[in-house]
Amino acid sequence: MSEAPSFSGVMCRWIGDVPLEADPMLIFAIVGSMLLVGAVVLAAVAIRRKRADARLGYLAQYDQLTGLINRTLFHDRLNGALTRARRDGGLVTVMFLDIDGFKGINDRFGHAVGDELLRQVAARLVSVLRESDSVARIGGDEFTVVLEGGKRVEDAGQVASKILRAIGTPFLVGDRELAVTTSIGIAVYPVDGNTAEDLVKGADTAMYQAKAAGRNTYQYFTRALRDRTADRLELLDELRAALESGDQLRVEYQPKVDARRGVVIGLEAFIRWDHPERGLLMPGTFIPLAEESDLIVPMSEWLLDEACLDMRRWLDEGMRPMRVAVNASERLFRDSNLVESIAVALAAADLDPRHLEIEVTERMITQEAERASRAIERLADMGVRVSIDDFGTGYSSLRHLQSLPVRALKIDDSFVRDVDRRDEARSIACAIIAIAKSFSLEVIAEGVETAEELEALRDIGCDRVQGYLVARPLRPQDVLEFVDDYDRTLSFRPD
Ligand code: C2E
Ligand code: CA
Ligand code: CA
């Protein structure tokens, strides 16, 4: 019977034919590494357990095939978005997508191909949407999307077009090229419904309308419904009554500031509708409706009157002179009644035109170039300042900018969002600032929400900003106090 082998003997044998002596240092190293391996294994077991737990949670909320969220989590996200919108007054868009003829692909090429196609469709959906949007697979070839924070009902259509294009580009599954299309239904809170259930149902119904309309297209639940039913007329009637009674519409004012000097440089007027049953309605929900009817004229006139009268009052109460900006309605601008309405409002409030500014979107300028330049010239002659809103989203030519008597460009909030982290946003913001400088125009960034965005904008030469970081739109009675406080505290004057 041999003697029990010593540990070092085992180690010597273990390293067997490695031509090495049993050096104590080597043994030490090997024992050390074995201990390390043991520790690593234990840690791995713990991680795996944790992962298993996480995986159970994951399975309950995510779709295994595509990795998208499932119906349950989708409803949670939608409800969260609705809660925020009820509080802050934004839009929430629900889309319902169905792949056209998916069953045929499954039948012809088998489920493995079908599954891979769904995975690729999911990946494309994710790639065209923003990170803040939610995409879910809620059934075989059915997907739902929530977009949050939109301002105009029409914006959803643009996103839907993007999705149609993305899905319409052929897929490569294995070595097979598959061309598919999709049909999309859209429902928007608060226009088409108040609850998650109603919105999903509305989007689903609209999706069937899109299929009926020939597939590879999108349909609004509203548009189909509005045209057929009394809903649209009802809202219009209510808007008319609101205008007559004068106690449901009101104006809020958002300060524009110069962050370098730490002063308020102006205010922008936004219309609000406190609807007795539907709650707070934001302009994106009713301005398009008003634009389609004649109501846009009295509504814009009312708003101009209010803004001028409020400014008159603030000045009388001792506010430092500044401008109040009013957004031009597309219709009014096109029909060029705007200039007359403005003259009347200024006279009624006994306000110097220098205290008024009109924001015209880049789109209005490019679509009706001649008429627009005439209106802008007349406003400038009157002494009213004109600035270009949503700059960067349209296609205005540099020649326009040079020939029009405009004084300021507003960097659209889509290039302000995450400008500190998105190179693309920063490049466009930089380009707009450069254009403004070379045409001697003022430049201001709208929709600044974070200190990081502000810092990034200041780094590239834009000190004038507007956005939730500085202030949300204020009630008229709160404006004077804000201006006073801001001017005094110098809160955004870091340098
Ligand atoms: P806009 O002129 O581009 O106005 C900016 C919108 O962004 C406003 O929404 C404003 O409340 C919101 N906003 C301001 N700061 C921030 C921010 O930091 N983050 C985010 N996410 N949003 C911010 P609102 O009031 O819903 O107006 C939407 C659009 O409706 C306006 O876009 C404007 O085109 C139009 N609009 C608003 N009021 C009037 C009006 O009285 N007359 C006309 N014709 N159009 C109006
Ligand atoms: Ca504006
Ligand atoms: Ca804008």
Image (spheres, grey):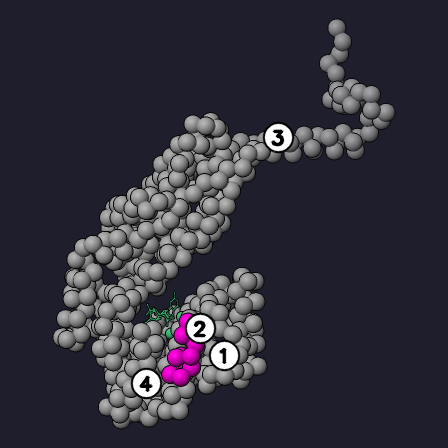
In whole angstroms, how far apart are the C-alphas of marks 2 and 4? Answer: 19 Å
Q: Tell me which secondary structure the magenta stretch mostly adopts.
A: helix
Answer few, some or many: residues within 10 Å of disc 3's Cα (few below 14, many 20 plus, some between 14 and 19).
few
In whole angstroms, how far apart are the C-alphas of marks 3 and 1? Answer: 73 Å
In the rendered structure, which disc, 2 or 1, sits on the residue that comes first in sequence? 2
Mark 3 and mark 1 residues within 8 Å of each other at the beta carbon = no
Can residue 336 be spotted in the picture?
A: yes
In the rendered structure, which disc, 3 or 2, sits on the residue that comes first in sequence? 3
Residue wearing tag 1: 400
* Residue for point 23% across, 56% down: 227
- Three-letter amino acid code at the position of disc 1: His
Can residue 349 be spotted in the picture?
A: no
Answer few, some or many: residues within 10 Å of disc 1's Cα (few below 14, many 20 plus, some between 14 and 19).
some
Mark 2 and mark 1 residues within 8 Å of each other at the beta carbon = yes
Q: Residue 371: within the magenta? A: yes
Magenta residues (range)? 367-376
In whole angstroms, how far apart are the C-alphas of marks 4 and 1? Answer: 20 Å
